[in-house]
Image: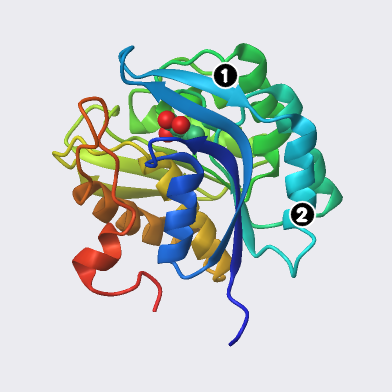
Amino acid sequence: MTKPKITLTIAGNDASGGAGIAADLKTFAEYGTFGIAALTVIATMDPNNNWSHGITPINPKVVKDQLVTATAGPGIDAFKTGMLPNVDIITVIANHIKEHQMTNFVADPVMVCKGEDEVLNPENAEALKDVLVPLATVATPNLFEAAQLAGLKTLTSVEDMKEAARIIHDNGAKTVVIKGGKALPGTKAIDLFFDGKEFTLFETDKIDAPSNHGAGCTFAAAITAGLAYGLTPKEAVAKAKEFVTAAIKTGFPFNQFISPVFHSGYRLSHHKAIIE
Ligand code: PXL
């Protein structure tokens, strides 16, 4: 058997299974890559308190130890970051990436999870902006995160997204895809991709489905797997958009609070693998 592509996620556990490392590992498996997870935080949700989030960060030293373990093997073909609960953890990860000259990095700058302020405090957003996102091969902010990373006010149009993408690229990220998602006014779900030279719009009709929990993580993990196979960032984003659209369409209500995407949706509805 030939060695599979190896993909690593450095992210949190969403104990409800839709987002975080669960989304990433399931997506990696759908792409046929060998997934590894380094855990940064445990996120729990309380059904008796309106699904409010509990955030338990992992000790930064243990995050470092997991990275040492993961990168002691035959080599990571591509990797991503997700929810990073504090500046110490962000710093540990950035240092490890630089020390090991790790490449093919998808930075998903998770900032909001039901407005939980332990996830998004101002220093955390600053560290993502200054320390981690500049190392990215592909940065995948949503509208809110893009505004934070670019130091702009609320983004409400494709023109605003272009301005933010330019700033995030100029700060160091090689390419940027800003997810317009449901938040952008209009009937289309528009993602804007920028490689420093040209802008590309990826458009689909907005899906009339509530199942979007985990969509951001799944999209970033799918881009990561695409990069592992040697796709260009733009090709990887195009495939990831197809993959996450199918996952949203096949999502389901988990309980009264959330409806996750279904990470196997592409394969089960198309009867084929995303990369043959
Ligand atoms: O979807 C953002 C997200 C990322 N990572 C973890 C989460 C969430 C939202 O719940 O729990 C671990």
Identity, as a three-letter code, of the amino acid under mark 1: Gly
| Rendered location of residue 83, percent (x, y) | 55, 33
42 above or below 233? above
Q: How many numbered marks does the figure carry?
A: 2
Picture residue at 80% right of the left edge, 34% below the top: 61
Picture residue at 31% right of the left edge, 59% below the top: 264
Q: Which residue is mark 1?
A: 151
Q: Which badge, 2 or 1, is on the more N-terminal residue?
A: 2
The outermost residue toward the front is 48
| Rendered location of residue 89, percent (x, y) | 72, 30
Q: Nearer the viewer, residue 51 or 114?
A: 51
Which secondary structure, mark 2?
A: helix
Q: Is residue 220 visible from the viewing direction of this image?
A: no
Q: Nearer the viewer, residue 31 or 18?
A: 18
In the image, is 266 to the left or to the right of 59?
left
Q: Is residue 234 visible from the viewing direction of this image?
A: yes
**Mark whose residue sits in front, 2 or 1:** 2
| Rendered location of residue 150, percent (x, y) | 56, 25
Picture residue at 48% right of the left edge, 60% below the top: 28
Locate the N terminus and report the quarter of the image it occupies.
bottom right
Q: How many residues crowd mark 2 within 10 Å: few (<14), some (14–19), many (20+)?
A: few
Which secondary structure, mark 1?
A: loop
Locate the C terminus and report the quarter of the image it occupies.
bottom left
Identity, as a three-letter code, of the amino acid under mark 2: Thr
Q: Quadrant of residue 208?
A: top left
Instruction: State the mark number for residue 81.
Output: none
The residues bearing labels 2 and 1 have C-alpha atoms spaced at a distance of: 36 Å
Picture residue at 71% right of the left edge, 31% below the top: 90
149 above or below 103? above
89 above or below 80? above
Instruction: State the mark number for residue 69.
Output: 2
Q: Quadrant of residue 27?
A: bottom left
